[in-house]
């Protein structure tokens, strides 16, 4: 095969570094990957909480403040620093100050925090080079998505990648936000009548001082939805309210949230969902759509990249091997725990059909140390990003999460059965990146996710560590160069 990996920024990258939240795909990782000529991607999920916690920890290195100094909406950076920045960091045992939970309508001040946070992460990922940078978001985490997109666009994001749902309204929102116009999207609310709709709205004009809304348009980023079936890709290509530029085709071995198996859910003897032939994506049909696509899920190897190119894909999206490299946002002790577990055979990956409050299967790294800590955790929901909206009998909307205290959830109309096995991903994933909340001197335990190909880490972590550059070099090692 007469193919070579590019060394400068390609219009269609061979390797997309997957968007791993919360904060695993941080600005350092995306910056490192983009500098190498591939598509570095930051995670936009919960990025507002990530920013304010970094500030409360003293902003080591001054990176948040350096990026905030470039934020274009006047006064916002000063307000954030005045409210959250602690020059000496939090005293030991002090809890992080929380942001108000998202609702259908939140204050302008709350929106500004989200916009600024997305700007900061994207700006830092782009700093010092002229290569493209992307952002990944979860469709299911609806309420912050429009302001997050606008913040990333203010910083020049080149590509938006979205999974965990069907993001049919995002292309049109990108078109509107690029002109600083008001964007809306349907709000998923349980209990609505068939002919009833609720909406989420975001208007950039409300964030800018009077007379200062820019007139120059922003770059409209390319949009790549994550799909698990060619039929879904065809629907998005035809029926989205704006331009779709390509697809990430994700198989069930990918980390984080997975699409559920097609058809009736069946579990194997260990309680994991069974995927079959119906879940294999028809790549011939993907090629017929005439749009580029990248394969994800177990493809982050030299063999995976070769296989993808031979199947007509533009390349691969890679998560797991980037997740544990030096530049990723995972806390050093979490990386060390997992890499040791992989090396000695005590770490494994389980696809848990119950862990995520979203209802999507979610992959969990099984380590005895982390499981023991998680078993002791008391239920609490104080971040609320995965809450679902429900219409009450009186017509008002309230919010609930299947991982919140059971009595609270039931009082809001939920069932005890739906709470079984649920995990607080918001708090657990923040703990992964060293931003664990502390309550009464007890820190949140980590919840680590990974793709099924976790064993491939042994190919890279020869001395217990490796870099993003090592990942790029290794994945490209199977591609012969042109002579």
Image (cartoon, grey):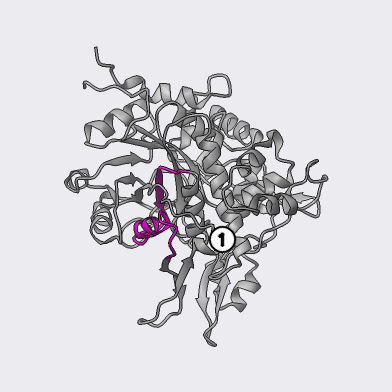
Q: Is residue 306 above or below residue 354?
A: above
**How far across and down, in percent of the image, does residue 464 sit?**
58, 23
Taking depth in this image into account, of 311 and 211 the one nearest to the observer is: 211
Q: Nearer the viewer, residue 443 or 4?
A: 4
Is residue 362 left or right of 295 when viewed as pictured? Answer: right
In magenta, the rendered stretch is 156-183
Q: Residue furthest top?
A: 483
Kindly identify the residue that appears in the image at 59 percent across and 38 percent down. Answer: 330
Q: Secondary structure at mark 1?
A: loop
Residue pointed to by mark 1: 207
Residue 312, x across and y down, in percent: 22, 36
Confirm whether residue 270 shows in the render: no
Q: Quadrant of the N terminus?
A: top left
Q: Residue at x 44, y 70 (%)?
A: 188
Query: Is residue 162 on the magenta stretch?
Result: yes
Observer-nearest residue: 332 or 289? 289
Label 1 Cα crowd, 10 Å radius (few <14 / some 14-19 / many 20+): some
């Amino acid at each position: 095969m007469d193919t070579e990996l590019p060394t400068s920024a390609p219009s269609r990258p061979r390797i997309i570094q997957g968007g791993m939240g919360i904060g695993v795909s941080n600005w350092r990782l995306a910056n490192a990957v983009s500098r190498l000529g591939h598509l570095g991607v930051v995670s936009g999920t919960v990025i507002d909480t990530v920013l304010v916690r970094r500030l409360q920890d003293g902003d080591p290195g001054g990176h948040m403040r350096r990026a905030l100094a470039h934020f274009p909406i006047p006064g916002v950076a000063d307000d954030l620093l005045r409210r959250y920045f602690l020059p000496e960091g939090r005293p030991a045992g002090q809890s992080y100050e929380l942001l108000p939970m998202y609702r259908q309508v939140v204050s302008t001040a709350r929106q500004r925090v989200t916009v600024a946070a997305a700007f900061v992460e994207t700006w830092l990922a782009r700093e010092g080079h002229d290569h493209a940078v992307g952002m990944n978001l979860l469709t299911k985490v609806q309420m912050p998505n429009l302001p997050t997109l606008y913040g990333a666009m203010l910083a020049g994001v080149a590509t938006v990648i979205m999974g965990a749902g069907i993001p049919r309204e995002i292309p049109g929102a990108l078109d509107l936000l690029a002109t600083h116009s008001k964007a809306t999207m349907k709000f998923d609310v349980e209990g609505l009548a068939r002919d009833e709709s609720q909406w989420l709205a975001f208007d950039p004009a409300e964030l800018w001082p009077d007379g200062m809304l820019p007139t120059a348009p922003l770059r409209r980023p390319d949009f790549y939805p994550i799909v698990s079936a060619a039929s879904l890709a065809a629907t998005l290509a035809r029926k989205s309210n704006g331009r779709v530029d390509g697809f990430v085709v994700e198989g069930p071995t990918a980390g984080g949230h997975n699409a559920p198996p097609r058809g009736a859910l069946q579990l194997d003897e260990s309680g994991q969902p069974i995927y079959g032939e119906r879940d294999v994506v028809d790549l011939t049909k993907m090629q017929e759509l005439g749009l580029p696509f990248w394969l994800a899920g177990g493809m982050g190897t030299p063999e995976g990249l070769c296989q993808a190119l031979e199947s007509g894909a533009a390349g691969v999206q890679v998560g797991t091997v980037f997740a544990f490299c030096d530049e990723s946002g995972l806390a050093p002790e979490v990386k060390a725990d997992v890499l040791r577990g992989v090396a000695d055979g005590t770490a494994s990956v389980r696809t848990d059909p119950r862990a995520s409050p979203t209802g999507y299967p979610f992959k969990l790294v099984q380590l005895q140390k982390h499981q023991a800590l998680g078993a002791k955790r008391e239920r609490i929901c104080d971040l609320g990003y995965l809450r679902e909206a429900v219409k009450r009998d009186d017509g008002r909307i309230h919010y609930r999460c299947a991982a919140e205290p059971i009595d609270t959830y039931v009082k809001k109309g939920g069932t005890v059965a739906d709470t079984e096995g649920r995990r607080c991903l918001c708090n657990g994933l923040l703990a992964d990146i060293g931003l664990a909340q502390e309550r009464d001197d007890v820190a949140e335990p980590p919840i680590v996710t990974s793709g099924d190909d976790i064993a491939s880490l042994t190919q890279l972590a020869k001395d217990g560590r490796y870099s993003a550059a090592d990942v790029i070099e290794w994945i490209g090692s199977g591609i012969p160069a042109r002579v």
